[in-house]
Amino acid sequence: AVQSLSGTGSCRLMADFMHKFKPGAKVYITVPTWSNHHNIWGDARVEKETFRYYKPETRGLDFDGMMEDIAAAEGGSFFLLHACAHNPTGVDPTADQWREISKLMREKGHFPFFDMAYQGFASGDCVRDAQAIEIFLSDGHMVGCSQSYAKNMGLYGQRIGCFSLTCNNEQEKIAVESQMKRIARATYSNPPLHGALLVSTVLGDPELKALWYKEVKGMADRIISMRTALRNNLESLSGDSWQHVTDQIGMFCFSGMTSEHVDALYEKSIYMTSNGRISMAGVTTKNVETLAKAMHEVTSA
């Protein structure tokens, strides 16, 4: 493992590692995904493919389509997976579904690379939010992981992350880590120190770590409560079901609104990405009613 420039830097190191040591390999990316994933692997000259993930009709997981695409992919492909709190949809597989995904990917010889930018923001439990990785490891996979401490430690401006790859033995670990460092050296030389010391101090002290877990859960619980409040307000106004607002998890709500709806909200000084993704961290007890009213007005017009 090496320290990286947050999650983006970790992903870029993995993309460059792929290009250098597995030339010609494809990376499969969810539809939809965080838009920068395409930029990162594209700029690293790695061939990209996509696989089904989100089902607009149900505003949930397209599990059958996902499994079909994993099965159809060329053996030995790389799959970019969101460890928890999928961005932008907020839709995650269940533990049982992760086990099925792991089993199929093992059979196909695929390599799973997990982007974990929101650990703790899905369930409020940092350990539980890592369950997908634990399932894959217990099934015997070699895995890669990008970790970001930008959100869950409030260190966005410090650019603190970690890029990890599992290895078979100590000798392999030394060889792999030296190449990880070589790529990082040519890319940005050295990562920031101050934020890394904050992270290592918190994680290395049992009392501070327990306090951090508690504070992360407090933030996650607040977001969950805002989901409930937004859903209740929308259903009270419209009489329609907005269940997907509370079914989804993490920082984002994939509302189902169109770009036209988003443009109309812009005129009301309410802002979100053009695909209808709401940052639930920006929803508060003071603005949730205003948000729900505006959403109802533009979606029922």
Image: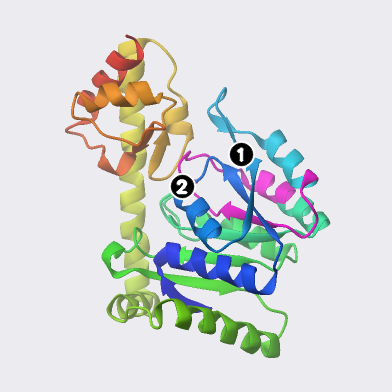
**Dot 1 or dot 2, earlier in sequence:** 2
Choose between 65 and 190: the one closer to the eye. Answer: 190
Task: Write the start and end of the magenta stretch as one range.
Answer: 72-101
How far across and down, in percent of the image, does residue 171 sit?
69, 90
The kind of secondary structure element at disc 1 is loop
Mark linked to residue 206: none
Type of colouring: rainbow
Mark linked to residue 53: 1
Q: What is the three-letter code of the residue carrying label 1?
A: Tyr
Residue at 76% of width from left, 39% of height from top? 68
Residue at 22% of width from left, 24% of height from top? 289
How far across and down, in percent of the image, does residue 197 sit?
32, 81
In the rendered image of this protein, does residue 182 appear above or below residue 225? below
Q: Is residue 252 visible?
A: yes
In the rendered structure, the answer to whether residue 291 lies left or right of residue 212 reads left
Which corner quadrant of the image does residue 175 belong to? Answer: bottom right
In the rendered structure, the answer to whether residue 290 lies left or right of residue 46 reads left
Residue 93 lies in the magenta stretch: yes
Q: What is the three-letter code of the residue carrying label 2?
A: Ser
Choose between 133 and 193: the one closer to the eye. Answer: 193
Quadrant where the N terminus lies?
Answer: bottom right
The kind of secondary structure element at disc 2 is helix
Q: Is residue 292 visible?
A: no
- Which residue is labeled 2 in the image? 35
Disc 1 to disc 2, how far (Cα)? 15 Å
